[in-house]
Image (spheres, rainbow, N blue to C red):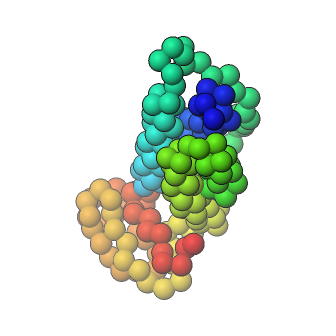
Amino acid sequence: MEFKDSVTRQNLARAFAAECQDGAKYQFIAKDAKQNQLNYISTILKMLAKNEMAHAKMFYQHMIDNLPQSSNGNVNIEAGFPFKQSEIASSLFTAAEIEQSEAENIYPAFAKIAKDEGFADIAKTFLQVAEVEKVHSQKLSFLAERYKKKSLYKCQSAIEFECSNCGYRETKKDAWKTCPLCQYPQGYVIIDFPQDWR
Ligand SMILES: [Fe+2]
Ligand SMILES: [Fe+2]
């Protein structure tokens, strides 16, 4: 199968667009979180956005590597681009759902097509990215649920909380409202994903 006639070429363009879209949205959420004093959530979302840009670059590179020299590089695609206004909790839930469908449906399907069309290396990237998106989905839904229940900084039993600004640590059930050492607000407390969060 020639790359220019393949469905994989279309799918790479779709995946590239999806990753750019996810990355942009996570930066929006990061900004929102920061404005709401949720600094550590903002840090996590910025990290996820960075991951998405790295994925976008991988798909972009596969496209460049496979396009014939003579091609002008343009790919026309049809794909869904959902726009909706939402606050932090629902943005996180929506993001978790999108990640889950990329992980479980979209990228595995793209990988199968790529394999069938003879593009084993592209298939491998789709599967490897799907694994990462699965973890993204789990992290986002963990944050969304805890945020909604107002239990980001509450635990059943005492755990060691740490301030991401000054490194102050203390073992307790509820994190401090204001860091006893640097006076930074609760939003700077590091959110650990517990062992059983999956
Ligand atoms: Fe991604
Ligand atoms: Fe992701």
**Picture quadrant of residue 2:** top right
Of the pair 40 and 133, the residue shown nearer to us: 133
Q: Is residue 147 visible?
A: no
Quadrant of the snapshot with the N terminus: top right
The answer to whether residue 131 is left or right of residue 5 is left
Residue placed at 37% from the left, 72% from the top? 161
**Picture quadrant of residue 32:** top right
Residue 170, compared with residue 42, is above or below; it is below
Residue placed at 53% from the left, 66% from the top? 152
Looking at the rendered structure, the number of numbered marks drawn on it comes to: 0
What is the x, y in percent for residue 106?
A: 68, 49
Of the pair 26 and 171, the residue shown nearer to us: 26
What is the x, y in percent for residue 67?
A: 51, 25
Q: Residue furthest front?
A: 1
Quadrant of the snapshot with the C terminus: bottom right
What is the x, y in percent for residue 40?
A: 42, 55
Residue 150, compared with residue 61, is above or below; it is below
Residue placed at 43% from the left, 83% from the top? 158
Residue placed at 44% from the left, 65% from the top? 191
Q: Residue furthest bottom?
A: 157
What is the x, y in percent for residue 35?
A: 49, 42
Q: Is residue 63 visible?
A: yes
